[in-house]
Amino acid sequence: MEQYDAVIVGAGPAGLNAALVLGGARRRVLLLDGGPPRNTRATAAHGVFTRDGTPPGQLKTLGLVDLAPYPVTVVSGVAREARSLPGGFAVRLDRGWVQARRLLLATGVRDVLPNVPGLRARWGRTVHHCPYCDGWPNREAALAVLGSHQEGHHLALSVRAWSKSVALLTDGPDELTDEQRRDLARVGVPICTAPILRLGGTDTVQVKFRGGERLTLDAIFLNPTQVQNSSLAASLGCELNEKSRVVVNENGMTSVRGVWAAGDMTGAPQYVMNAAASGMIAAVSLNTTLIHENVRRLGAAFHKSPGEEEGKAPSGGEAS
């Protein structure tokens, strides 16, 4: 089998930045590119340092170009299976098996959108997830939040920071408390509980309700349910939390020795810059363990600093 220091599964911001860091650390890396990023339908990514407003697909292209000088092999495809081996892992690709000393998972999550006809076709265009990403282009616009109970209440109050024209569409019973209804009334957010028949429109969102009423909006925001985009972490035995996110420590280490995870799959805040940063943190941690391992093979070791807590790992890696 082909041998790598690390296999990175997923080429979103987390995986790309991890590959950049590990490649720069002179590690032989295989990056598995599973396809377009989750935000590929968005017209622009915002809050991205030096690249504000760049389309997500273009960000990915630029990230791949940055890898060219480094010992990083990029392969289109996904990891079909991964197995633990003495000293590493075997990963099955469409073309066969490869071997890696370490694994870094950056497979992301998948949005499960509400079953509202016409919504999916407008996802990333006039229907959005994150006001920090898409609030500025819709400032002072006619907006609505699609949701109910506490999540709808919170998101409506938040979106109002970008526009004072915000309505809460609950598509049925609102499941709000009396105090939450009073909150929304205090800030001027009307609540519409009418069931939605469908969404239409191109540059705007035309909401048609089952009773025949219509509402024209510039954009809708919602918090979709999300699931893991890949079963790889679970199949390896990585611990998941109650929301099925992969549990990691501050360095991106999972509960399985030799496996790191980064980006949205860990439940971290879902911003491009945050995902990229988590990829770097995980890559530094992963590389530090390889440095320790190589030093030990030569008969040397990193020694604890005086007064260092027992079992406390050095910054970015495992304890010697």
Image: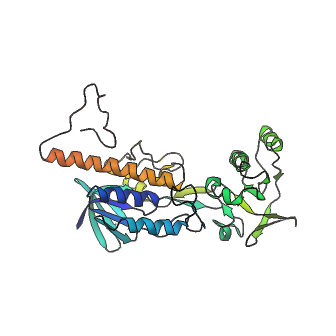
**Residue 134 can be seen in this image:** yes
Q: Quadrant of the N terminus?
A: bottom left
Q: Position of residue 67 (x, y in %)?
A: 36, 65
User: In the picture, residue 172 is in which quadrant?
Assistant: bottom right
Q: Position of residue 248 (x, y in %)?
A: 42, 45
| Display coloring | rainbow
Q: Quadrant of the C terminus?
A: top left
**Residue 237 can be seen in this image:** no
Nearest to the observer: residue 40 or residue 85? 40
Nearest to the observer: residue 125 or residue 140? 140
User: Which residue ends up furthest to the left in the rendered image?
Assistant: 299
Work out whether 317 lies above or below 114: above
User: In the picture, residue 5 is in which quadrant?
Assistant: bottom left
Q: Is residue 162 left or right of residue 8?
A: right
User: Which residue ends up furthest to the bottom in the rendered image?
Assistant: 95
Work out whether 287 lies above or below 53: above
**Residue at 45% across / 46% down in the picture?**
247
**Residue at 45% across / 49% down in the picture?**
246
Q: Position of residue 103 (x, y in %)?
A: 33, 56
**Residue at 76% across / 57% down in the picture?**
143
Q: Is residue 213 left or right of residue 101?
A: right
Q: Is residue 295 left or right of residue 97?
A: left
Q: Is residue 143 left or right of residue 74?
A: right
User: Which residue ends up furthest to the right in the rendered image?
Assistant: 212
Nearest to the observer: residue 39 or residue 63? 63
